Amino acid sequence: MGAGLVPCAEGGARVFHDDFDGYALGLSKTAFGGTWSTGDTNVDVIGTGLWDLMPGNGAYIDMEGSGGNPVGHLTTQTLFQPGTYCLRVWVAGNHRNGEPDTVEIQLGSDWWIVNRLRDDPFEVEEMRVTLAWPSTIELIAGGIGWNEAGLLVGEVELLALPSS
């Protein structure tokens, strides 16, 4: 976990939200309508209608896409301005094989690693982050090798918190 990260308090104004329901389902996705970039990687958008491993959760991202790249790497196309924020990311296990998976979540100079076992349900991970300069949100897949069955990301939300 990055230095200085603490859980969020309630409140704040939503400045970014993506539940991935607005994207076409598909494997090896590299384009997200200007919201995210994948660099030289790809991810799978799965859920209701395509590889629905967790029914009732709409669309979600498999961070280890099916296109032969070693890891998925999502970066927001929005730069978030200096200030204090609450970053929330809903993550679940891969629900396919027995290997644990990780995702590194970054915002500015703060980062933390989230681990999930195969059958872990979607649970929110949240951290309070203070940005000193304009920054993006990054999600970077990790785990034990690349096997096209990565940690699942169901939603990302960023709240601007009042100055203290």
Image: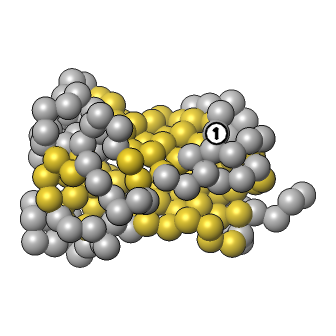
Single out the residue that lies furthest toward the front: 34
Question: Image height check: is 78 above or below 48?
Answer: above
Q: Quadrant of the N terminus?
A: top right
**Mark 1 secondary-structure assignment:** loop
Quick check: 36 left or right of 2? Answer: left
| Residue 25 is at least partly visible in this image | yes
The image quadrant that residue 86 belongs to is bottom right
Spot occupied by residue 97 in the image (x, y as percentages of width and height):
12, 40
Spot occupied by residue 159 in the image (x, y as percentages of width and height):
64, 64
Question: Image height check: is 163 above or below 137?
Answer: below
Which residue sits at x=26%, y=72%? 58
Across the whole image, how many numbered discs are drawn on residues?
1
The image quadrant that residue 71 belongs to is top left
Spot occupied by residue 153 in the image (x, y as percentages of width and height):
34, 54
Which residue sits at x=48%, y=51%? 76
Quick check: 146 left or right of 81? Answer: left
Amino acid of disc 1:
Gly
100 or 139, which lies in front?
139
The image quadrant that residue 54 belongs to is bottom left
| Residue 90 is at least partly visible in this image | no
- Which residue in the structure is indicated by mark 1? 108
Single out the residue that lies furthest toward the right: 164
Spot occupied by residue 142 in the image (x, y as percentages of width and height):
33, 31
* Crowdedness near tag 1: few (<14), some (14–19) or many (≥20) residues, C-alpha within 10 Å: some
Which residue sits at x=30%, y=72%? 21
Single out the residue that lies furthest toward the top: 145
Q: How is the image coloured?
A: secondary structure
Question: Image height check: is 20 above or below 115?
Answer: below
Q: Quadrant of the C terminus?
A: bottom right
Which residue sits at x=23%, y=28%? 70
